[in-house]
Image (spheres, coloured by chain):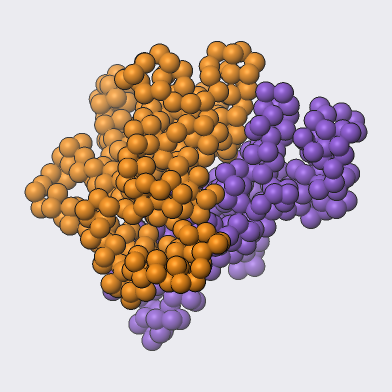
Amino acid sequence: MEKLDNQINQTVFSRIVENKTMLIGLIIILIILIFAIFADLIAPYNPLEFHMADRCQSPSAKYLFGTDNFGRDLFSRVVYGTRVSMRVGVLVVITISLFGTIIGLLTGYISTIDYYLMRVMDAFMAFPSVLLGISIVAMLGATVTNVAIALSIVYIPRTARVVRGTVLSLKNSEFIRAARAMGASDLRIIFIHILPNSLAPLIVQVTFVFATAVLAEAGLSFVGAGPPPPTPSWGNILSEGREYIRTYPWITIFPGLFIALTVLGLNLVGDGLRDILDPRLAKSVKDEKDTDENA
Amino acid sequence: MGRYIFGRLLAIVPVLMLVALLTFLLIYFTPGDPAAVMLGTEATPERIADLREELGLNKPFLERFIDWGIRVLHGDLGRSYFLNRPVTTSILERLPATFTLAISSLILAIIIGVPLGITAAVKQGTFFDGSIMTFAIIGVSIPRFWFGLLIMILFSVKLGWLPTGGYIPLTENFLEGLKRLIMPAMSLGFAQAALIARMTRSSMLEVIRQDYIITARAKGLKEFVVITKHVFMNITINLITIVGLSFGVLLGGAVIVETVFVYPGVGRLVVQAVQSRDYPLIQGILLLVASSYVLVNLLTDLLYPVFDPRMRD
C-alpha cells in the first residue's frame, strides 16, 4: 500500500515537472508573489512619492519603468500594485471556495433545494460579470475589500455550478450507495465522501477564477470603480496613463504587461492542474507505468 | 418540439422575475437616502421628507417592488438623477452603438476563432496546434482594455490611420463609422476569438475520438468530408452555446472598452452613472442588459433543435 501511495505521489509530482507550461506558470506566479510580499525591499522608491523635477521620464537606470505625470516611479508603483491584485485574488478565492462549495454541495445533493437555489444562481449569472461588479462596488464603495466582495458575489454562482455538477455525478455512485447502506448520515456522506472527491474540479475552477478576478479588478480600477487613487493598483496606473498615451506610452505598457503575465501564469497553472487532476489522464499514465513494470 | 419551445419560454419567466428582484434589491440596499442624493447637500430635512413621500420611499418593500415592477412593464425605468431625463430614453439612445460593437466583435471572434480551433484540432500535436494554442492562451490573458490601448498607440498615435475614438452610425457614413468601430471591435473580438478557438478545439477533439469518426475514415471518406460533414456538424450545438455565452461576455467587456475609446454606448453610460452615483440609471441598465442576456440564451436554446434532429422529438 505504501509503495502504491509513493507511486501515485510520484506520478502527480512527475506530471507537474513534465508539464513545462505549468512550470512556467508556477514560476511566473512565484515571481509575482515575491513582488507582493517583498515590495518594501524590491521597490526602490515610495510609490506615492512625487519627484516633480523628474515628471514623465522615459525608462532609464534611475527609473526602471520611467515616471508618471507626478514624477512617481512607475516600477515601484507596479511592484506595489501586485499587492492589491493578489489581495483581491486571494480574498475572492477564499470566499468563492467556501460559499460556492457549500451551495454546490447542497444543490447537488438535495434536489428540492437545487431547483430554487439554481434559479437564483441563474439570475445572478444573467448579469455580465463586469457590469454586476461595477454596480455592487458603486453601492458599497470603492475599497479593496468591497471590490473583493463584489467579485465574489459575481463568481460564487459559477463555482457552485461546477461543484454541483460533480456532486450530481457522484451522488449515485456505488461507494456512496455503500456508505448509505452502512447507515452513514447525509451530512457524513456529503462531507466525508462527496466533498473530497469534488476537490479536483473545484481547484481547477478556483485557479481560473483567481485569474479572472485579477483581470476584473484591473478593469474596475481602470473605470474608477476600484481602490481609489493614489492607491497603486495596476488599473489605476493604466487609467492615469491614458491621458498621456500620445506622448508617454510607457505609462500604459508596463502595468498592462504585469496584468497579462499574472493572468497568463494563473491560466497556465489552471490548464496544467486540469490535465493532472483529470482521472482519465491519470489512469492512462498509471496503466503505462504498470505495463512498463510487467514487461 | 412545440413542448420543448413552450418549456423553454416558461423556464425564463422565473429567471426574469429573479433578475428584476435582484436589480431592485441592489438599489434598495444601497446605503444613503436617494431623496437626499437628488436634492443635494443643501436640502432641508423637510424637503427631503416631502420628496421621500412623493417618490414612495416610505412604503413597505413589497409595495415598492410591485409599483416599480408595474412601471418597468410599462417601459418606465425611472428618471436619471443627474441627466434629469427618463432612464429609458437615455439607454435607448445608446443601445444601437453598443449592439453594433457587440455584434461586430462577435462576428470577428467567430471568423477568427472557429477556423483556428478547427485547424488546431485537426493538426493536434503539430506546430500549428502549438502556435494556435499559444496565441489562444495569451489572448485570454491579455486585458481587453490594455489591448485596446496598445492598438490605439499603434494605429492612431504611431501610424495615424484611425481616429482614437468616437462613434458614427454605419448607416450614416459607412467608412467613417467603420474607422471608429474597428479598434473597439478588435479589442473585444480578439480576446473572445482566443476563447472560441480553445473551446472549438476542445469540442472537435472530443468528437474526433468517437468511434463513428474512425468508421468514417475506415470507409475511405476524404479527410475534408470527415471533418466538415461528420466532426464539424456534431459540434454546432457547442458552438451555438459558446456564441450565446460570448454575447454576455462582450456586453460586459463593452463597459470598459467603450471607456477606452470614448465610445458613446451603454457601457460608457453605466461608468458615468457609477461615477455620479446615479442609481436609477445603474438599475435600468442592469435590468436591460441582464434581460437581453436571458433572451439571447433563450434564442440559443431554441436553435438547438434546428441543428440537432434528436431534439426535435
Please name the residue shown 49% across and 35% down the image: B258
> Which quarter of the figure has residue B60?
bottom left
In the rendering, what colour is chain A? purple
Residue, far left = B2
Q: Which of A288 and A200 is in front in this view?
A: A200
Please name the residue shown 26% across and 46% down the image: B295
Relative to A87, residue A289 above or below: above
Residue, far bottom = A183
Relative to B154, residue A53 above or below: below
Q: Give the x, y percent position of residue B142.
A: 58, 36
Q: Give the x, y percent position of residue B167.
A: 44, 26
Q: Is residue B40 visible?
A: yes
Q: Give the x, y percent position of residue B39.
A: 48, 60
Q: Give the x, y percent position of residue A40.
A: 85, 53
Q: In the picture, which chain is orange?
A: B
Q: In this view, does A213 lie to the left or right of A23?
A: left
Q: How many labels does the image show?
A: 0
Please name the residue shown 79% across and 38% down the image: A70
Q: Is residue A280 visible?
A: no
Quarter of the image containing the N terminus of chain A? Answer: bottom right
Q: In this view, does B72 lie to the left or right of A60?
A: left
Q: Which of A279 and A263 is in front in this view?
A: A263
Please name the residue shown 72% across and 23% down the image: A247
Q: Is residue B153 left or right of residue B9?
A: right
Q: Which of A255 and A108 is in front in this view?
A: A255
Q: Is residue B17 left or right of residue B154?
A: left
